[in-house]
């Protein structure tokens, strides 16, 4: 009877280097045990991909594709952060919204497997968790999203929802080093594309100017690998960036 479930799970995995980008996807029916989520102890899985640990603050992540794999351990050193007003994140002037929180304080270590072999890595990671029962507004066509680790430990999340007939809807959150969120309403952040890359059958902005005058921030954000295109059933650009 598990095959009768109307629920379908989808998983995407990607790995980006300065010169290469790999992507993979999985689909599964949750009703027969091949995919699912358990809250406590935490586990999310689809086939042999998984994110699991005693809690969401202490997890291991494994995934693989035809040419890559990773096995990582992520431990949070700070709190979960609600985005928007107490986790209610507005997405348009018409009021479309989601519930949204982040964990931007993971310390990560583990191994990556690429065609040249296995690489030991360590660094930081950022998790976003977002859910909604609403689509974008009829005038919106997509989005550009930024998650930045600033000097001194502060963080900045910003996104611009693209409109067909009006300026983009740009909001975000400035996160203090101790995890305190400071919501940034529409109009406080300015996002300006500076350069594009032909990838995925179109032109994608891969260099940006981001300004937040209230925090004296005026930076240029550039893709580490402009070709970081997720060549999946629902395709999109996603990858690491640097800024100065």
Image (cartoon, rainbow, N blue to C red):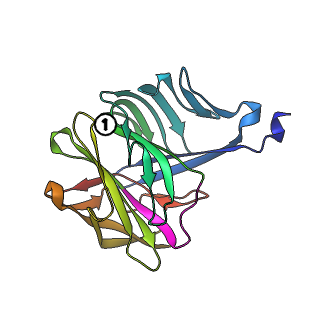
Q: Quadrant of residue 158?
A: bottom left
Whether residue 194 is situated above or below residue 11 in the rendered picture: below
Look at 56% across and 50% down and name the residue there.
Answer: 132
Asked if residue 72 can be seen in this view, the reply is yes
Q: Is residue 204 above or below residue 125?
A: below
Question: Is residue 142 within the magenta segment?
Answer: yes
Tell me, yes or no, if residue 115 can be seen here. no
**Residue 240 vertical placement versus 59 (above, below):** below
Q: Mark 1 falls on what kind of element?
A: strand
Q: Residue at x 42, y 58 (%)?
A: 228
Q: Residue at x 36, y 50 (%)?
A: 17
- In the image, 147: left or right of 200? left
Residue 225 screen position, x and y as percent = 34, 58
Residue position for label 1? 124
Name the side, left or right, on which 140 lies relative to 227. right
In the figure, is residue 65 to the left or right of 237? right
Residue 55 pos. (x, y %)? 47, 23
Residue 51, how many percent across, how many down?
52, 31
The question of residue 120 being in magenta is answered with: no
Location of the N terminus (image quadrant): top right
Identify the magenta region: 134-145
Q: Position of residue 91 (x, y in %)?
A: 45, 59
């Amino acid at each position: 009877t598990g095959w009768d479930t109307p629920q379908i799970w989808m998983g995407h995995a990607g790995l980006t280097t300065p010169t290469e980008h790999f992507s993979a996807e999985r689909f599964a029916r949750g009703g027969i045990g091949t995919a699912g989520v358990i809250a406590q102890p935490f586990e999310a899985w689809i086939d042999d991909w998984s994110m699991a640990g005693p809690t969401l603050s202490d997890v291991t992540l494994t995934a693989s594709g035809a040419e890559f794999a990773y096995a990582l351990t992520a431990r949070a050193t700070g709190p979960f952060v609600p985005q928007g007003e107490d986790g209610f994140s507005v997405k348009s002037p018409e009021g479309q919204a989601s519930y949204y929180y982040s964990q931007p304080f993971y310390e990560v270590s583990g191994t990556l497997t690429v065609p040249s072999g296995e690489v030991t890595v360590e660094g930081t990671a950022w998790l976003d968790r977002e859910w909604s029962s609403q689509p974008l507004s009829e005038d919106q066509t997509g989005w550009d999203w930024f998650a930045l680790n600033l000097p001194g430990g502060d963080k900045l999340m910003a996104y611009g929802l693209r409109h067909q007939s009006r300026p983009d809807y740009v909001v975000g959150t400035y996160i203090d080093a101790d995890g305190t969120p400071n919501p940034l309403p529409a109009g406080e952040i300015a996002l300006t594309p500076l350069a594009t890359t032909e990838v995925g059958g179109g032109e994608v902005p891969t260099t940006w100017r981001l300004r937040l005058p209230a925090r004296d921030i005026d930076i240029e954000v550039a893709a580490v690998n402009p070709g970081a295109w997720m060549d999946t059933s629902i395709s999109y650009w996603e990858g690491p960036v640097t800024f100065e």
